[in-house]
Image: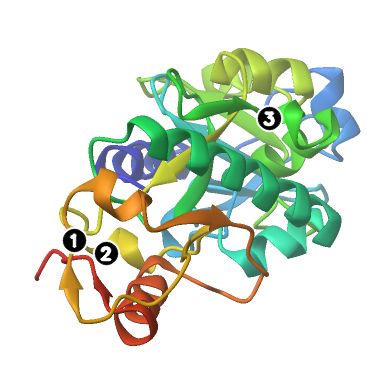
Amino acid sequence: MSKVSDLLEQELVTLVEDYIGQRIPYDLPQWLIDEGVRPGAKIVAVDGIGSKSRLNKTDVLIILESSSPIKISAKLANADYFGNWYSHKRFLDEFGFEAFERMTKASTAFANRWAETAIAPFVGVSICFGKRTGLTGQDFTDIFTSRDILTVARGFGVGDSTANCMYIADYVPRTIEELIDCLQEISIETVNEATENFKVAHRPINPITEGTNRGKNVYTRFQPYKRLPEPTVIREPDILFSLGRFVTVEPDGLNHNHILNDLEERYNIIVPRKQK
């Protein structure tokens, strides 16, 4: 989460803390009741858990007496991503191997197109889900089912980390009643509306300018045609991409640094890396 998102989470927690021991409204929307939330339930505790783990889709957890909790996924109105930097393990847990095969094929097709006009070198492509404009965005439903959108927004499985509602705004409500009134159901329609056409965001990483992002898992990798006769430093994308093509990958945790190491050790291709 960003510092601004962390602040939104904390401000929501602070609001609810003032109502511990009091009751939530009796007039709840039916979708929230269907999530197991009891009208008029007493607020027992609240915790901001979104910043504690990147795997948590729930940002603000409201514990209620004799009721299922309210598990809020809090987003800024201008937030770009619902699912940021998907690892292979997380991807398999949420979507399965067949979806991974579709994803790596899509990322490979994107990378080979991108390489034709790229103005910076890259050796792999990572992914995010959410808003995206321009040529790096691809319709989510090109690769996934519409129901998979709910997995990205809500989370996978059961438990406190899986959200059951959304709060999307750039301000903090003044009262618990206002907060409840602002909560939205997590549905295909509301998520699509919130993200303005849900996208897979392909993220080619330039190793010359990127540091920590080189550790993100990739969904395609650059594969040279052959080993160069001697170690050669390559900065220009047109020269790099004349030496090979992007190919699909297995879900084995491969990242940009792994590929860069392999290019240097096995193919004598040295793409410079940003230093700490």
Q: Residues within 10 Å of mark 3 (few under 14, many from 20)?
A: some
**Image coordinates for residue 34, horizontal then vertical, percent:** 90, 31
Rendered view: 253 above or below 217? below
**Which residue is the site of mark 2?**
212
Q: Amino acid at mark 1?
A: Ile
> Does dot 2 land on a helix, a strand or a loop?
helix
Instruction: Report if residue 208 is visible in the image.
Output: yes
Percent coordinates x, y for residue 140 in the rendering: 68, 30
Query: Residue 22: which quarter of the image?
Result: top right
Query: Which residue is under mark 1?
Result: 234
Mark drawn on residue 140: 3
Pointer 3 with pointer 1, Cβ within 8 A: no
Name the side, left or right, on which 33 lies relative to 5.
Answer: right
Mark 3 vs mark 1, foreground winner is: 1
How are the residues colored? rainbow
The residue type indicated by label 3 comes to Phe
Three-letter amino acid code of the residue under disc 2: Thr
Given residues 261 and 98, the one toward you in this image is 261
- Which residue lies at the image location 77% right of the left edge and 23% below the top edge? 188
Outermost residue toward the front in this view? 229
**Horizontal side, residue 34 vs residue 120: left or right:** right
Rendered residue at 56%/74% (across/down): 253
Of the residues tagged 2 and 1, which is closer to the observer?
1
Q: State the CA–CA distance, disc 2 to disc 1.
A: 21 Å
Give the position of the C terminus as an image quadrant: bottom left
Which tag, 2 or 1, sits closer to the chain's start?
2
Q: CA distance from mark 2 to mark 3?
A: 26 Å
